[in-house]
Amino acid sequence: MTARRSVAAAAGWSGMSNIVLRLGGVVVGIILARILTPEEFGIYAVALAAQAVLLTLVDLGLSAEIVRSEDPEPKIPTIATLGLVLGAAITTCAILWAAPLAELLGSADAAPAIAVLAVTVVLGGAGVVPYALLMRRFQQRELFAISAVDFVVSTAVTLVLIGLGWGVVSLAVGRVSAQAVSLVLQFVAAKVRPRFGLDLALLRPIVAFGAPVALANLVAWLLLGADKVVISTVVGVTALGFYTLAFNVSNWPMSALSQMVRSISLPLFSSAGKNHADDMLARVTGIAWAGAFPAGVVLAVLSEQVIGVVYGEKWLPAAPALAALGAFGAIRVLFDVATGFLYSRGRSGLVFWIQCAWAVALISALIPATHLYGIVGAGLSQIGVAVLVVLPAFAVMLRMARVRVRSVLREMAWPTVAAIAAGGVAAGVSHLVDGAVIELLSGGASAVAVYLALMWRWGRTRVRGLRAPQTQPAGERDAARELGRVG
């Protein structure tokens, strides 16, 4: 199998995986929203925020090091040891300090869930090697199967325990159970056994690459977790429950697309020759934006109808926040593509500095905006900082990596125009009819029709470009054959 076919197959499996699992997650989320209160949603959001920061500490860029390395085999024992030791240490500390951490994050009631979720950290550290190997080999079909099992186990355990009256802790136990099963399946699918060791000669370059990645991930937690901490402490966990629901809804289309981009971008850009890297970045960015931005626009325009129809009137206070977060979710996909490209070129330090600027600007905006406008202010802070600070920063860093940014912008231009037009039509049509369900269906259908009509020629041209053969230099052909062999 050629490298092109490996990437295409990986993208297909990754996309299908995320669409199927996202649809399943939406259904389960709707069920949970009908059972749990906004306050309980907020409590679990605090626990997830704590888990996220713990997972960033254990990552240390270890999986990225395996994916991007020309010969990862000698590094595997050292990376496996680092992952397991770090995971065990962080899990122990988190369990012991769960109560103080919960109070620091604004909800003492989240302590039990934090202690349970801490177990996922050591499981994640133990699974660094098999997961990275599956990613490196473009084995998205196997990852899809593992994710499906993970979803079934998590959902079944959670719903059973909720039925038994375990409350918020049910979600945490479900997550730990699913991750334990997934860890075993990852080793089976990757056809590797745990191997441990410590090569001091390899340790330094691994840490040199991984430290900026870990720091960038930690700062990334500030970006995705700071809003929840600020909301919890400023306006309370009930408001955080509404905000969390809005954030989750905004991730319906974005998570599927963003996860697909993450799963293929680093190995794809790593295997590309320097002569083709710019064109590949522009093409991937254009296609990702063409899928993400229209979804964000429609969610923003029809936010009230989406929340009211899907979750019920008790969740309508989440609608204004969704209007802002929908567009933010679309822009995040661009950041994922750019980050994957910079990592593939060994520029992890550049990503770290972008994340730092992002975190400083976001926290500076979040606190006053949330005090003044509540969860709506938090959502507007996200989109404002993303457009005014982060996008320009990524553009500068890509130019430093000798990328022709104009070619990327040209690929994004027409999808942007088409999405705005589709959103305008959706808004107009929804105001011509009455009833939330009819407004949602008519507005959404009209937006899809207009967008597809405007994008037909653009999309057909890009698909032909992906299918057309390209001339590769000898070194890149060898890399392609090798990727095809292991894929």
Image (cartoon, grey):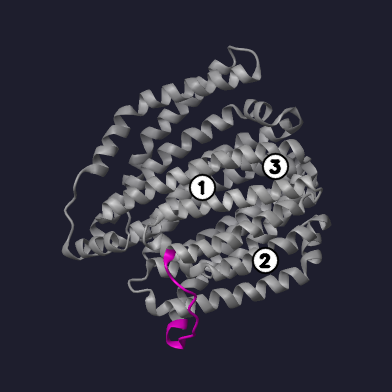
Spatial separation of the CA atoms under disc 2 and disc 1: 28 Å
Circle 1 is placed at which residue position?
332
Kind of residue at badge 1: Arg
> Label 2: how many residues lie within 10 Å, few (<14), some (14-19) or many (20+)?
many
Query: Looking at the rendering, in which quadrant would you find the C terminus?
Result: bottom left
Circle 3 is placed at which residue position?
243
Spatial separation of the CA atoms under disc 2 and disc 3: 26 Å
> Label 3: how many residues lie within 10 Å, few (<14), some (14-19) or many (20+)?
many
Secondary structure found at label 3: helix
What secondary structure do most residues of the magenta stretch adopt?
A: loop
Q: Is residue 420 left or right of residue 230?
A: left
Which is closer to the viewer, label 2 or label 1?
Answer: 2
Determine if residue 230 is in view: no
Determine if residue 27 is in view: yes
Q: Is residue 272 left or right of residue 142?
A: left
Residue numbers of the magenta segment: 190-203
Q: Earlier in the sequence, mark 3 or mark 1?
A: 3
Which is nearer the eye, 61 or 368?
61
Residue 396 colored magenta?
A: no
